[in-house]
Amino acid sequence: MTETPLLQHGLAELLRKVPNFFVYDDRPPLTASPGLAGDPWHTTILITDASDEFPDTMVSPILDERPESRIVVLTDSADHLFLWKVLTSGVHACLSKGVHLDELVSVLLAVHRKQDRFILSAPVGALRKLRPATAEPGPLTIREVEIMRLVAAGMSNRRISQQLFITETTVKRHLTNVYAKLDVSSRVQAIQKAFGRDLAEVAAAPGAPDPHGEAP
């Protein structure tokens, strides 16, 4: 990711003027804590250039360290594949670098109030191309296969996180990526498509937890 210190520091100064905002920009990425001093919300702001590849590797460490954190991407990219990577990475919002301060502040507050929403502001032409098939996601990673085997064994997200020593948020993010890659919408469908019907029947055998019972 290309560093943009002038933009980062300028944005930090603007956010510091917002009541009840606390900003830390001593090193990238920029972080902001909107909310009252006694009950802060932590947000990380990633700033990218149009030529950048989206750094998926930056997202997981942030959420592993602070699962309650929200991540907002500011970009000038209009590439639909870039936007799809952002959408499926665990990030909570993606906005244009030209966003107005009041709109950015509203988004920073909204991603904490509505934790199950993704906020995206991008060119209409790019949004119309946003389909899982266009992202060319490729095969499952080793970690995704490992998680799917535990899902097929009937484990809940919490049990999987304990087994693999990762956060439950990370498990959900991997499962969301698996769903997109396999073009499915449930755990059973994912098991069937990843391993075949036999493993799906094993997962649903008497005494095994219901694989329908938990969303990704």
Image: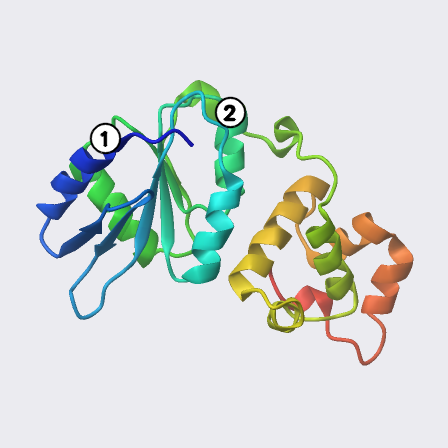
- Where residue 108 sits in the image (x, y, percent)? 27, 48
- Where residue 41 sits in the image (x, y, percent)? 27, 60
Dot 2 alpha-carbon crowd within 10 angstroms: few under 14, some 14 to 19, many 20 or more: many
- Left or right for 204, reference 162: right
Instruction: Count all numbered tags in the image, as a single digit.
Output: 2
User: From the image, which quarter does the N terminus lie in?
Assistant: top left
Assign a secondary structure to mark 2: helix
Q: Height in image: 142 above or below 137?
A: below
Identify residue for label 1. 7
Assign a secondary structure to mark 1: helix
Taking the spot 60% from the left edge, 61% from the top edge, the residue there is 215
Dot 1 alpha-carbon crowd within 10 angstroms: few under 14, some 14 to 19, many 20 or more: few
- Where residue 72 sits in the image (x, y, percent)? 35, 43
User: From the image, which quarter does the C terminus lie in?
Assistant: bottom right
Q: Residue 106's mark?
A: none
Taking the spot 8% from the left edge, 45% from the top edge, the residue there is 17
Amino acid type, mark 1: Leu
- Where residue 75 sits in the image (x, y, percent)? 36, 29
- Left or right for 76, reference 206: left
Q: Are marks 2 and 1 in contact (CB under 8 Å)?
A: no
Q: Residue furthest front?
A: 26
Q: Earlier in the sequence, mark 2 or mark 1?
A: 1
Taking the spot 32% from the left edge, 56% from the top edge, the residue there is 112
Disc 2 or disc 1, which is closer to the eye? 1
- Left or right for 186, reference 121: right
Identify residue for label 2. 80
Structure colour scheme: rainbow
Amino acid type, mark 2: His
Marks 2/1: CA–CA distance: 24 Å
Q: Height in image: 87 above or below 81?
A: below
